[in-house]
Image (cartoon, rainbow, N blue to C red):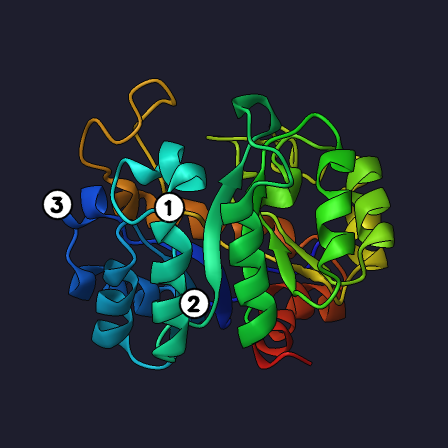
Amino acid sequence: MSRPAYSEPEPFADIHIHFNWDQKEVTSASEVVARLRAHNAVLVQVSSTPPRLALELADAAGPWVLPYFSPYLTERHRTTWAVDDNVVAEAAKGLASGRYKGIGELHVFPDNGLRRENKVFNGLLQLAARYQVPFLIHTEASSHLFFAPVCQKYSQVRFLWAHAGNRLQPDAIDQLMQQCPNLWTEVSARDPWRYGKLTDSDNLLLPGWRELFIKYQDRFMTGTDPVWGNSEDNRYANADEAWDHYTQLIEWHRNWLKQLPPEVEEKIRLTNARKFISGN
């Protein structure tokens, strides 16, 4: 049963945002902070290309914005990071500084030739284990079985699985979460404008999702993942105006969250993120 709408936005943990160079072209760090505050986003995790921009946003906001070290050292690294040994060295420097609170977002696609044995990939995972920081991973696979050996091999790493596997359905997500107790899952970009498959045309949760959220109510989180306006074919060719769409993204999340039992809604909206960040 849906809960009545609240008049003021309740605190929200947005655990997946970006402040990339192509976003900074049209939206300043101070403007991003203002939009987050306007929607009562009280705990935020940001990854940026290049990674120094995550620090810039955190400096503009304060300790409630946590910067992650992105392996995309430049705009070209999204497709070349796995063959650049310098990525691990730079990540090690970033984590050693104490300023970065996690690694990611890291995109791992089985159809682009990246093997699980890739030394750069494993080097980053080893850093996450050494520094005991979360690892935000985006897997684009047709089955959860691609990721299972990774989260099992690195059982000491706290994984944050972006977009709940993107297009995977609740049964597959359930299987992976059973197999990997060190896996936390978030559902950013499952909105109607991108991956979808979370709600129907009336913004009601599709079959299986409510049950999944209740079953793993202590391991789900959400975020907005503001990326907009560029197709996969011309990604990053133009400035990204995603922050102009922040209101519709966060309000969509607040709507489906209200369809959950109140205690589950609060965990996914806020308290799970606090526990995840603290390592509890």
The correct choice, above or below, for 87 with respect to 66 in the image is above
Q: Residue at x 18, y 35 (%)?
A: 239
Residue 3: quarter of image: bottom right
Label 2–label 1 contact, CB within 8 A? no
Q: Which residue is mark 3?
A: 25
* Res 84 seen here: yes
The disc, 2 or 1, on the residue closer to the chain's N-terminal end is: 2
Q: Residue at x 87, y 52 (%)?
A: 178
Q: Residue at x 58, y 62 (%)?
A: 126
- Of 263 and 66, which appears nearest the observer? 66
The disc, 3 or 1, on the residue closer to the chain's N-terminal end is: 3
Residue 160 image offset from top left, x and y in percent: 61, 57
* Res 252 seen here: no
Q: SS of the residue at dot 2?
A: strand
The correct choice, above or below, for 181 with respect to 37 in the image is above
Q: Which residue is mark 1?
A: 226
Measure the alpha-carbon separation of dots 3 and 1. 15 Å
Q: Which residue is mark 2?
A: 44
Disc tally is 3
